[in-house]
Amino acid sequence: MLTSKEKIIIAALNQFSRKGLFATRIQDIATEAGISQGLLYRYYKSKNEIYVDLIEDALDKMNEAVEGIASLNCGGREKLLNSIEGMYKTIEESDRYRQTSSLIAQAMGSEAIPQEAKDALKNKRDLPYQMFSKIIVQGQKEGTIIEGDSYDLAVLFWSTLNGLTIFRNTRDEKRPLPDKRFIANIFLKEKI
């Protein structure tokens, strides 16, 4: 059974990802969560506070996932393949991840968000690129990942996966994502 706070988070993420920060009202969140506004205010002082909490949580989870891949005891090639496999599964199966991706994309493109959300984005958004750049360098040293600027390749990698998330978010039909090997073969010296 979900706690009231968990219900608020789920409802707020759904509302913000569909309507954006300013079109979402506290009443919308409370109604979707199936609680009163008064109960919502016991957990959060404002919708901006909920919004910042969602942004912080999303960035932290994303960074933890990349740090987990980076810390695996395997080569750069295997880390890259594990990343693709994990992201495909997440994109295909997790509504929450897809909503979170929409929320982050909206936040990145807006100046009209709370300062705390801007600060979180500024301080945490580049960690996946930096961490994945190290994975690419590892694979380059091992001779399994193509040559090139490791940060540029990390940007290409994450942009490709984020693009697939956007593709899935903007389609009602459940068309399968392109073959994972297409992405892997962009980066690997020995194609699969």
Image: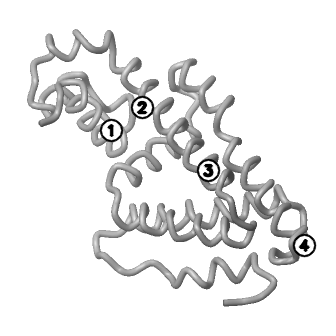
Q: Which residue is mark 1?
A: 13
Q: Earlier in the sequence, mark 2 or mark 1?
A: 1
Confirm or deny contact between disc 1 and disc 4 (CB under 8 A): no
Location of residue 138 in the rendering, given as x and y in whole percent from the top left corner: 83, 62
Three-letter amino acid code at disc 1? Leu
Q: Earlier in the sequence, mark 4 or mark 3?
A: 3
- Per the image, the residue denoted by label 3 is 66
Q: Which residue, given by chain and number where applicable, does mark 4 sit on?
A: 147
Mark toward the viewer: 1 or 3: 3
The type of residue carrying mark 4 is Glu
The residue that disc 2 covers is: 54
Vertical placement of residue 121 versus 50, above or below: below
- The foreground one among 89 and 106 is 89
Mark 1–mark 4 distance (CA, rounded to whole Å): 39 Å
User: What residue lies at 90% left-to-right and 73% top-to-bottom?
Assistant: 147
Q: How far across and down, in percent of the image, does residue 78 sit?
A: 67, 71
Q: How many C-alpha atoms fall within 10 Å of the one at disc 1: few (<14), some, or many (≥20)?
A: many
Q: Disc 3 residue type?
A: Val
Q: CA distance from mark 3 to mark 2?
A: 19 Å
Asked if marks 2 and 1 touch (Cβ < 8 Å), the reply is: yes
